[in-house]
Image (cartoon, rainbow, N blue to C red):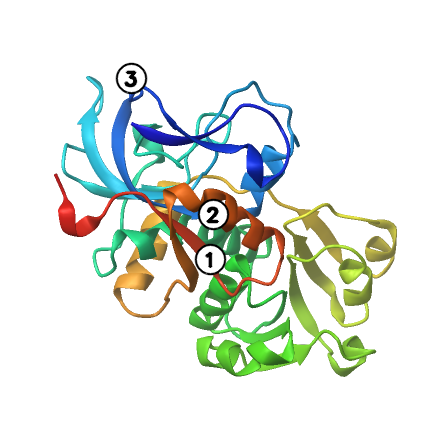
Amino acid sequence: MKAIEIHSFGGPEVLQLEEIPIPQIAADEALVRVYASGVNPVDYKLREGASKRPLPFIPGWDLSGVIEETGANVRNFKKGDAVYTRPDVKRDGTYAEYVAVKANELAYKPSSVDHVTAAAIPLAGLTAWQCLFEYGHLRAGQKVLIHGGSGGVGTFAIQFAKWKGAYVITTASQSNHNFLKELGADEVIDYHTPGYEDTISSVNLVLDTIGGDTQKRSLKFIMPGGTLVTTLKPEDNEPFEEKGIRLTGMYTQTRPEDLTAIAKLVDEGKVRPVIAKVLPLAQAATAQEMIEGHHVRGKIVLKVHDEDKEE
């Protein structure tokens, strides 16, 4: 099979298109024919050596595809099932024509969208869902501020929060304001505006996807008893404790029940994945360069197999 492999840590140039054997599956696994793979910041961070994992390895941890084979102990899926997931990041990833995945990590893909669209969902969708509802305990009628609304996580978080019945504020550059209002944001604030945080008040939950001084600046408008959830590293907890605000990091878990809930919202037309660009597998380096620029609206997806030419 064709796959993108990393044989040394470094820049996008270390992403090499190779011919390697199709993976063998264990009794509790499924072999999935990958139709599309989402591209995420974790991909280039691991490429640069963030975890110093053993080499070589295949990056990519977002997929939509069709089950080609199941292990002897797999009962809930069968050959031909269309599935999607965020596989275990400790294993080889999805920049490949086939991938071996634990069956308990799989969910049926949304039936109303193609594989390219479905592949944009898992990691960003799970992150947004778990930030808002597991870590942030967001409820209807509350006010949430989402930093970085135009990114992969942000675009999902806006839609999830609006579906939940929250009042949604987000930050973004001016060029994305109308687009984010179309997604459901009640207010969009230009983060380039000096002192923008002084215009916000009484927020119950903040979702930080930006980092830096964003957490400290958010202190001004979070209510006592409120929460700030960051997808990055929690910085200084002391001033949050002094104001009675909870500061927490998060770790995205692959939960099929969450993926199933998200798929239902997509199929009901209440949530739509936002895709900035679709590229072929061979252009994985270009895709990662775009992600590293931090100004992608939604997600970039690698198309691995052509759905019009299913074998």
Q: CA distance from mark 1 to mark 2?
A: 7 Å
Q: Secondary structure at mark 3?
A: loop
Are circles 1 and 2 on residues that touch, CB within 8 Å? yes
Q: Which mark is residue 39?
A: 2
Instruction: Say what amino acid the circle numbered 3 marks.
Output: Gln
Q: Is residue 102 above or below residue 273?
A: above
The amino acid type found where label 2 is placed reads Val
Residue 75: tell me if it is visible: no
Q: Earlier in the sequence, mark 1 or mark 3?
A: 3
The residue sitting at 67% across, 52% down in the picture is: 230
Residue 45 visible in the shown view: yes
Q: SS at mark 2?
A: strand
Label 2, label 3: how far apart the Cα atoms are: 24 Å
Residue that numbered label 3 is attached to: 24
As drawn, is 110 to the left or to the right of 242? left
Which amino acid type is marked by label 1? Lys
Q: Which mark is residue 138?
A: none
Indicate whether 271 appears above or below 279: below
Q: Secondary structure at mark 1?
A: strand
Q: Earlier in the sequence, mark 1 or mark 2?
A: 2
Marks 2,3: beta carbons within 8 A: no
Q: Quadrant of the C terminus?
A: top left
Looking at the picture, how far across and down is residue 45, in whole percent? 62, 39
> Can you give x and y, in whole percent of width and height, for residue 44 in the image?
58, 41
Could you tell me residue 71's position as x and y percent? 22, 20
Compare residues 219 and 112 and report the one nearer the observer: 112
Residue assigned mark 1? 299
